Image (spheres, rainbow, N blue to C red):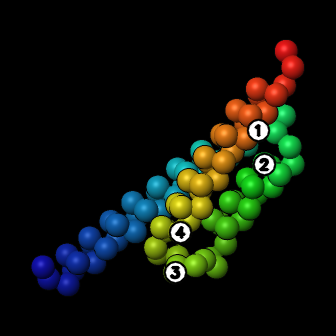
Amino acid sequence: MDGSALWWVLGAIILATAIGAGWLLLRVVRARRALVDAGVPVRGRALFWAAVLYTVPPVDLLPDPVYVDDIGVLVLALRALHTAARNAARERPG
């Protein structure tokens, strides 16, 4: 593989991970709506903002072209948010 092909492959990997992180960020934003509708306490909403604030700024555990840590934070936030929304919906009378 010559040098230019390697750059194309590396660029494609970076683009795919960036798209994946963006898709997960969109899912977290949609999950926030479910939190508000379900009446989830402030702690759950704080988790949403923590995940967004970790994903958006350029300061990360790993350098920004590698979105593995961002994707991991977003996946964990999504799981926790959906669990909180389900629990809040069960506890809500009606």
Report the amino acid beneath label 3.
Pro
- The residue identified by callout 2 is 44
What residue lies at 56% left-to-right and 53% top-to-bottom?
75
Are the residues at dot 2 and dot 1 in contact (C-beta closer than 8 Å)? yes
Local secondary structure at mark 2: helix
From what the image shows, is residue 10 above or below residue 41? below
Report the amino acid beneath label 2.
Gly
Spatial separation of the CA atoms under disc 2 and disc 4: 20 Å
Spatial separation of the CA atoms under disc 3 and disc 1: 31 Å
User: Residue 69 or 21: which is nearer the viewer?
Assistant: 69
- The residue identified by callout 1 is 35
Q: Locate residue 1, reporting x and y percent.
A: 12, 79
- The residue identified by callout 4 is 69
Mark 2 / mark 3, whichever is N-terminal? 2
Q: Is residue 62 rendered to the left or right of residue 10?
A: right
The label number, if any, that marks residue 63 in the structure image: 3
